[in-house]
Image: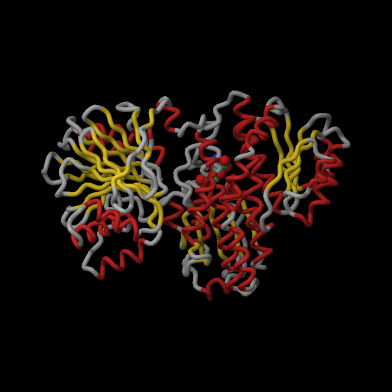
Amino acid sequence: MCGIVGYIGDRQAAPIILEGLTKLEYRGYDSAGIAVRNGDSDIEIVKAKGRLKVLYDKTNSGQSVVGCCGIGHTRWATHGEPSEENAHPHYSNDCCVVAVHNGIIENYQELKEKLIKNGYVFYSGTDTEVAVKLIDYYYKKYFGNPIDAINRSMVRIRGSYALAVMFKDYPDEIYVARKDSPMIVGIENNESYFASDVPAILKYTRKVYYIGNLEIGRLQKGKVTFYNIDGYEIEKEMTEITWDAEAAEKAGYEHFMIKEIHEQPKAVSDTLNSVITDGKIKDNAFGLTADEIKNISQIWIVACGSAYHVGVAAQYIFEDLVRIPVRVELASEFRYRNPIIDKDALVIIISQSGETADSLAALRESKRMGIKTLAIVNVVGSSIAREADIVCYTLAGPEIAVATTKAYSAQLAMSYVIAILFAYVRGEIDEKQYTSLINDLLTLPDKISRLLEDKERIQWFASKFSNAKDIFFIGRGIDYAISLEGSLKMKEISYIHSEAYAAGELKHGTISLIEEGILVIGVLTQQELYEKTLSNMVEVKSRGAYLMGLTNNGNYNIEDVADFVAYIPKIDKHFTTSLAIIPLQLMAYYVSVARGLDVDKPRNLAKSVTVE
Ligand code: AGP
């Protein structure tokens, strides 16, 4: 996810663009850049690695870059490390075409090969540079018409994009094109704006046009003309924005956390699509040869917090599918326990930030021991990403809320794909099982979306327990892993004490804590364990507990035991964590809101724990 902004009018563009980018830093902030021109002058491009402040300093707050027409970008790296070369804007070799982009060009490799065959050279590792040079290719090959060149490129590109393009031959014009990534166009008096999101231009205009998929906009001073992919002019409705600036940054959601909970379908879909194409896992998706995969003798999964809970779920999935021993360790324990690790083991480090001190130390300890390491990370170019032997990036985009949701879900998705690949390569599953698992996996985004539609019911139930003193989560197998994450979410943002317990373990002591009215949430997605956990729920009910059940559609007899039930759509048992966690995230969120707490920035917590 990145942020793009642009302006044409009678004022200096750079300061307006920079200010707009500051409103979009929540969309990405590892590098930034602007391209500005004055009339038919050359296009001046200035880029900087690091936070937007670096670009501000480099351009004297935009004063040193002269011109009334420009585009700008703040980056969240997905292809190519954070660097000045990889920062946007990107440009054709003669600067005839200059552009900024938010999105993912899925087929950029094949397009790059085509362009190299046609004499193009590349200076960056980004998919965006490929898109820019593809537009340049068609612009030079056919008539030198921006709309035609962009249309031809849109037909060839697979993926998502919000593109803004300046053509050297067309001063005082900016062309924008969109597919799936957000973009708006604003008009006020003799000025035109575009942006990824409303906050960037709300200061200047509330009159916006939402450009549709596969549509193009031609921005001139105070005027925009829209075209469809066939190049025909189309009419669009103008919308009046009623949000205030802060609400706009959250796209109308009250908190970043609830916004990010709703971004999970896309985070999971983007992550899966980064390693699966046409129903198959991409060759060499994880940088391990078939022989290397076959040679793995054991797997260690090491992480902290929610990432650790991904590991606990992954342990069950890997052992069931891949049939090799899997150890899950807290990074803070692993780094000091002098672990006994088989020389042919694979250590998997999971981390959203890629900067968690304990997880980084565990990675370094594993490498010191000569063990191969694979990292599942959300932040491109982070320390763990750079130091692991192999890195698998989740594509959740920047996660602002301290309590992780979409990154956790993206990590789960990546773990499933690795497990399926390993199981298939090692001959533990056949072609039919492989296909069935992949097909079921690809239904996750839609099923998550459907669960989010049920949020009002969860909100009603959560409001009944906003004054709870204790909340227990119980489950067996993968359901225990789900319970761990559900409990952490609740603790983190509601400050209510909570414990997750293996349901079969309750009777060995903890059940003494169960008394009248205590909420116990039973997680029952593993059908073969359903009756066992149900009987544990009956045990705590007989001691006065108030019961919530979380189970698969069809298990309606649970309503004879539980006081409230949330159901998840049917899916392969290995993937239920991704669905069951949705009601639990919502539960924690609504309890926190009911308690009037700072959901996005809970007390005592940091988004990334970069100290021991
Ligand atoms: C989860 O909601 C917490 N914010 C925390 O447990 C987090 O998962 C943990 O600190 C690990 O962070 P990482 O994924 O960036 O390494």
Looking at the rendered structure, the number of numbered marks drawn on it comes to 0
**In the picture provided, is 73 more to the left or to the right than 374?**
left
In which image quadrant can residue 244 be found?
top left
The residue depicted at 38 percent of the width and 28 percent of the height is 240
Seen as rendered, the residue at the extreme right is 542
Given residues 103 and 517, the one toward you in this image is 103
In which image quadrant can residue 604 be found?
top right
Given residues 37 and 501, the one toward you in this image is 37
**In the picture provided, is 94 more to the left or to the right than 106?**
left
Query: Can see residue 486?
Result: yes
The residue depicted at 20 percent of the width and 35 percent of the height is 221
User: Residue 588's spot in the image, x, y percent?
Assistant: 63, 35
Name the colour scheme: secondary structure
User: Residue 421's spot in the image, x, y percent?
Assistant: 56, 67
The residue depicted at 25 percent of the width and 32 percent of the height is 16
User: Residue 147's spot in the image, x, y percent?
Assistant: 25, 51
Q: Above or below — where is 187 with respect to 97?
A: above
Q: Above or below — where is 475 with respect to 325?
A: above
Q: Quadrant of ligand 1?
A: top right
**In the picture provided, is 56 more to the left or to the right than 453?**
left
Query: Can see residue 508?
Result: no
Given residues 288 and 331, the one toward you in this image is 288
User: Residue 495's spot in the image, x, y percent?
Assistant: 64, 30
The residue depicted at 29 percent of the width and 58 percent of the height is 152
In which image quadrant can residue 196 be found?
top left
